[in-house]
Amino acid sequence: MHNLTRLYAAEQARENSATGSDDALLRLIDYYLHTAHAAAGHLDPHRDRIPLAPARPGAAPEEPADLAAALAWFTAEHLVLLDAVDIAVRSDRDRYAWLLAHALETYFDYRGHWHDWAASQHTALDAARRLADPSWQAGAHRGLGWVCDQQGSQDDALAHNEQALALYRQAGHRAGQAKALNNTGWLHIMLGHYRQALTHCAQAVDINQQIGDRHAEAGAWDSL
């Protein structure tokens, strides 16, 4: 930006009340969170959907029309979205940080941005620990497990998924348990541990049948 524009922006920021600045920050984060959430739905209709509180008045999130529009938005806002996760942490809004990192997973997977995915999930894991939320901690471990697998580190991936499974069990999150069981089973297959793989994947099938998640059940059958 032109230096005069920077000076004017700084002057306006100093003159704003603390409450006004806080409201503006929350509108900004709401815009990126809700738009990323909607865009991710186009990239993966079967992704884990976590209900969001309504966006604040004035946030005006976008609704990408289709897959191409969602990808174009993510690509254009990639660096800003990473900054938004960091801003949420620095402003002590760990819930927003975790939700933003979760919304970005599908895009990072789609484009192969493994380093950004890993960094944002480490941030999400730290946020979930501060929130003392075992289910969200498990979700971050599962995300990190997938990144490690894509990078060829199956042992690290297995360790993350085993932690995810323990945390999902602690939280009583059955759908999460089934996903972690299937992921753990798949990693045992990759490592040649076939007996352990059969046990984990069969348990995943059983839980998915009980909770009626046929998409996840199909994935577990595929692993078997």
Image (cartoon, grey):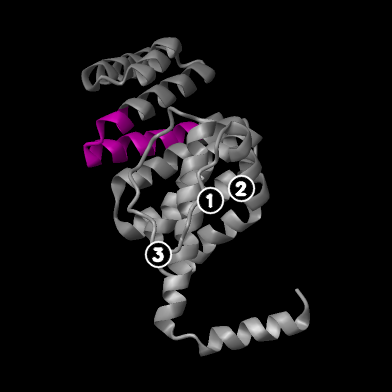
Q: First in sequence: mark 2 or mark 3?
A: 3
Location of residue 165 (image quadrant): top left
> Which residue is at 62% across, 40% downward?
114
| Residue 104 image position (x, y, % from top left) | 53, 44
* Badge 2 amino acid: Asp
Question: Does dot 1 land on a helix, a strand or a loop?
Answer: helix
Tag shown at residue 120: 1
The answer to whether mark 2 and mark 1 are in CB contact below 8 A is yes
For the record, the magenta segment spans 157-177
Where residue 201 sits: x, y (%)?
Answer: 36, 16
Which residue shows up at 39% across the image and 16% down it?
A: 220
Q: How would you rate the neighbour count of disc 2 (Cα within 10 Å): few for under 14, some for 14-19, many for 20 or more?
A: some
Residue 109 position in % (x across, y down) = 58, 35
The Cα–Cα distance between marks 2 and 1, rounded to whole angstroms, is 6 Å
Residue 130 image label: none
Q: What residue type is labelled 1?
A: Ser
Disc 2: which residue: 116
Q: Which residue does the numbered mark 3 point to in the structure image?
A: 93
Q: Nearer the viewer, mark 2 or mark 3?
A: 3
Tell me which label, 1 or 3, sits earlier in the chain. Answer: 3
